[in-house]
């Protein structure tokens, strides 16, 4: 739930100055997994800025999401090293299985799917990451099995 | 530990650290780089800890999880000192043998040794592994030896001695002179002479000046800056403090890419330690010089690696570049004189101050001095981080160190410089790698990514890939870059989809020229490089796509078909079961068939077929 006190604490910690804006948004993003509109409004109010100026920064950087994110986060690397080793086929397969495009979240909010430009472990390419777990030397034919694991965990947790 | 307030106190502390450092004591190191971690290095380290305890060796053997050793392809890596016995692909199950055989008896565990593919012989010692033997490691030298979060380890290998020398034996002008004489040039891409940059900033008016370390490392396929910040953060910090002293800055920042949490953690720890010991903060080691240093995490925008955009981003705004009529050395961060350098540039500084400009300048070529760290990735056998003197040839890097092409096919090209660079064809691999030679060949040094491509790589697809990258990352402020990249991408898209038209190559060249001439920052000015260089060297591939509607590398989906090679097909049914479209039919033990109308060319059948029975053309 959105809690204005938490946002105030973040503002307090960094100081309501322009130079601290990204750091504040980073803290809020890691708290909520996205940037709730109320939080942006609160920051704008405290910093005496038009909302659009806070929004512009939030929109500019890819680390920020203005929409709630899924429970599991799936990332496929499309950096050059992974690209030449077949990263696109993996991304295509993830998209097909989940029925979403990169940058989107499934309707049931279970999975968010993103592509990135290099995770810095190109030796393992092509790389896919699910909730911080790295899957190296991936192949399109292995995607289903990996995703299955997370779907089954969900089912087990709900049962 | 109280803050050290003089050089004498530092020296006393250093001696006490050295006294407790026993080079002959057995030590086992596990690579803690991102690649090895992903492959299970943490589990291996934990298992080693348990096994040492079990065998009662925990006080007799040091166990260290270090930074990246560089040979990422073979991780997790373990090295046993003092003999430097090198193990690769280690798992927790191998740990008991390593402890009882190697640490207790001193024998190598054969099955975990690296086997030289040329001789077929196992190699026992790390320095004899061809991947390491052919390198000259300066910046990367200690990555595999020290615990990155332990300042004592850095002190034991001579850390912060260069800072003492600079603060107590040299004037700022002498430091600048030394850097100038060394010939050090920026390692972030453009290769601007570092000493000259520092001098401009020193001479600029104003009391408030800044120094910044660029650890944004946006080039996909490059991860050496990350490995240095993670593996030896104090070496970068020491270089920056020396630089700040030279230019007269009292505040500095490191701008780190947000995908690098471990780098943020390790540099933050290093800063805290340096502050605690009086190597940062007010009156450093009693020299009278003050300097504070902060971490700024990036938030995901490639353009923020560019100097003026990066500064805008630290100020708390959207990171849009500005026109560089005035140098950052005069008006940079908050309009104050600022020096921005790349991670590797800063990390070179302590070595130059310690060993002298002449030592540095004797490595490299006439115009490019010292060593360069490359990330050797793509279709190469020994993927990893390699450091060689400037001027080494691409062939040496790809074949002698990299062990050749992983697919067994022929090398087609090497891409350098990321989205701002170009593709260098196989026939030019004897090119010595320095700033000038790469620029002449239509590419750039960039931050040191080398992506090796083989015959299965389509050069038009690569060009399209990079233009897509630039188009997405263009901040949109100037028209040439925003519109130019979009139009070029559209043309490349239609070519790879088999809808290319006569004149498209010329159109690409024309828009490319316009972007070079009209873009505000180097993002747009360099963006056409991947296209122009592939047109220059691989024009026939463009023409095959446009005229014959054919992709010679069999990559572009709309121009290829999948079919079954009847002689090879055993009718095992694996492809049929795995095909996501139900496009494959066939009875058990009978030759299967792919329906080209249903096939989406995802390539899964080829991946799962064990009989090499799927043809793509
Ligand atoms: C679009 C763009 C991205 C860049 N990204 C980086 C980067 O990730 N790391 C870096 O060190 N330099 C990068 N640069 C180069 C910087 O602008 C700058 O020249 C460099 O950091 C200066 O340091 P040096 O003199 O030590 O090379 C980039 C430049 C451009 C135009
Ligand atoms: S390109 Fe995928 S991890 Fe670097």
Image: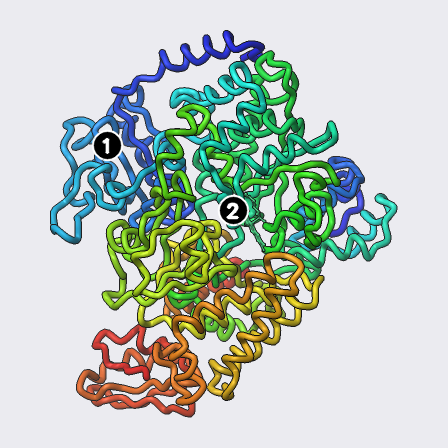
Q: Residue furthest front?
A: B366
B430 left or right of B249 in image:
left
Q: Image quadrant of residue B426? A: bottom left
B327 left or right of B396 in image:
right
Expressed as whole percent of the image width and height from the top left, the position of residue A35 reads: 71, 54
Label 2 element class: loop
Q: Image quadrant of residue B275? A: top right
Taking depth in this image into account, of B266 and B11 the one nearest to the observer is B11
Q: Residue at x 53, y 38 (%)?
A: B194
**Label 2: chain?**
B
Q: Relative to residue B3, is residue B206 depicted above or below? A: below
| Residue contact at pointers 1 and 2, CB within 8 angstroms | no
Expressed as whole percent of the image width and height from the top left, the position of residue B511 reads: 59, 74
Colour mode? rainbow
* Quadrant where the image shows the C terminus of chain B: bottom left
Expressed as whole percent of the image width and height from the top left, the position of residue B585 reads: 32, 90
Residue B84: which disc?
1
Residue B73: which disc?
none
Residue under numbered circle 2: B188
**Label 1: chain?**
B
Density class for disc 1 (Cα within 10 Å; few <14, some 14-19, many ≥20) is: some
Q: Which residue is drawn at 85% across and 49% down?
A: A49
> Taking the image as drawn, is residue B265 in sight?
yes
Cα distance in 3D space between marks 1 and 2: 33 Å
Expressed as whole percent of the image width and height from the top left, the position of residue B361 reads: 39, 34
């Amino acid at each position: 739930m959105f809690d204005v006190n938490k946002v105030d604490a973040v503002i307090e910690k960094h100081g309501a100055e322009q130079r601290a804006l990204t750091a504040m948004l980073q803290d809020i993003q890691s708290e909520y997994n996205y940037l709730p509109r109320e939080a942006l409004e609160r920051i704008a109010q405290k910093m005496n800025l038009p909302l659009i100026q806070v929004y512009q920064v939030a929109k500019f950087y890819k680390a920020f999401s203005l929409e709630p994110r899924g429970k599991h986060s799936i990332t496929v690397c499309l950096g050059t090293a992974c690209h030449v080793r077949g990263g696109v086929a993996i991304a295509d397969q993830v998209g097909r299985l989940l029925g979403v495009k990169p940058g989107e979240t499934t309707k049931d909010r279970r999975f968010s799917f993103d592509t990135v430009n290099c995770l810095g472990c190109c030796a393992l390419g092509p790389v896919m990451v699910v909730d911080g777990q790295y899957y190296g030397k991936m192949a399109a034919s292995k995607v289903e099995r990996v995703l299955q694991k997370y779907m089954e965990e969900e089912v087990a947790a709900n049962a | 530990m109280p803050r050290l307030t003089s050089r004498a106190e530092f020296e006393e502390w250093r001696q006490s650290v050295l006294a407790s450092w026993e080079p002959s004591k057995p030590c086992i190191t596990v690579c803690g780089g991102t690649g090895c971690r992903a492959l299970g290095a943490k589990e291996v380290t934990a298992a080693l800890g348990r096994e040492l305890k079990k065998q009662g060796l925990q006080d007799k053997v040091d166990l260290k999880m270090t930074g990246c050793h560089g040979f990422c392809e073979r991780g997790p890596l373990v090295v046993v000192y003092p003999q430097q016995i090198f193990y690769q692909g280690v798992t927790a199950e191998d740990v008991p043998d390593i402890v009882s055989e190697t640490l207790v008896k001193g024998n190598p565990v054969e099955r975990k040794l690296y086997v030289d593919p040329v001789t077929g012989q196992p190699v026992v010692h790390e320095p004899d592994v061809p991947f390491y033997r052919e390198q000259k490691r300066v910046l990367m030298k200690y990555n595999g030896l020290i615990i990155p979060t332990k300042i004592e380890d850095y002190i034991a290998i001579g850390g912060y001695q260069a800072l003492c020398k600079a603060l107590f034996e040299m004037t700022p002008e002498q430091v600048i002179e030394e850097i100038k004489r060394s010939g050090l040039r920026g390692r972030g891409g453009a290769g601007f002479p570092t000493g000259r940059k520092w001098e401009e900033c020193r001479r600029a008016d104003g009391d408030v000046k800044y120094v910044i370390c660029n650890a944004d490392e946006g080039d996909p396929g490059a991860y050496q800056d990350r490995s240095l910040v993670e593996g030896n953060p104090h070496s970068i910090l020491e270089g920056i403090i020396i630089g700040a002293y030279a230019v007269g800055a009292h505040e500095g920042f490191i701008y780190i890419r947000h995908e690098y949490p471990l780098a943020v953690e390790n540099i933050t720890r290093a800063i805290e330690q340096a502050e605690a010991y009086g190597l940062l903060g007010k009156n450093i080691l009693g020299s009278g010089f003050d300097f504070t240093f902060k971490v700024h995490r990036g938030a995901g925008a490639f353009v923020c690696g560019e100097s003026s955009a990066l500064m805008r981003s630290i100020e708390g705004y959207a990171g849009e570049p500005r026109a560089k009529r005035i140098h950052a050395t005069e008006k940079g961060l908050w309009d104050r004189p600022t020096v921005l350098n790349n991670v590797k540039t800063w990390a070179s500084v302590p070595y130059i101050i310690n060993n002298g400009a002449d030592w540095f300048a004797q490595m490299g070529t006439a115009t490019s001095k010292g060593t360069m760290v490359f990330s050797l990735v793509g279709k190469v056998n020994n993927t990893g981080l390699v450091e060689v003197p400037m001027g080494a040839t691409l062939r040496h890097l790809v074949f002698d160190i990299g062990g050749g092409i992983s697919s067994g096919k022929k090398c087609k090209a090497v891409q350098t410089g990321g989205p701002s660079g170009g593709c260098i064809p196989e026939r030019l691999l004897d090119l010595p790698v320095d700033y000038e030679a790469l620029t002449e060949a239509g590419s750039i040094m960039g931050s040191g990514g080398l992506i090796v491509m083989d015959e299965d790589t389509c050069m038009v697809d690569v060009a399209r890939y990079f233009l897509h990258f630039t188009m997405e990352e263009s901040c949109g402020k100037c028209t040439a870059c925003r519109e130019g990249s979009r139009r070029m991408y559209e043309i490349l898209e239609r070519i790879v989809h088999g809808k290319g038209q006569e004149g498209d190559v010329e159109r690409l060249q024309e828009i490319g020229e316009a972007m070079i001439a009209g873009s505000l920052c180097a993002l747009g000015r360099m963006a056409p490089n991947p296209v122009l260089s592939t047109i220059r060297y691989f024009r026939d591939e463009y023409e095959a796509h446009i005229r014959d509607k054919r992709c010679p590398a069999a990559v572009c989906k709309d121009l290829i078909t999948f079919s079954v090679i009847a002689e090879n097909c055993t009718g095992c049914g694996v492809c049929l079961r795995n095909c996501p479209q139900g496009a494959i039919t066939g009875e058990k033990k009978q030759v299967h068939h792919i329906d080209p109308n249903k096939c989406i060319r995802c390539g899964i059948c080829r991946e799962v077929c064990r009989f090499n029975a799927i043809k793509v053309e």
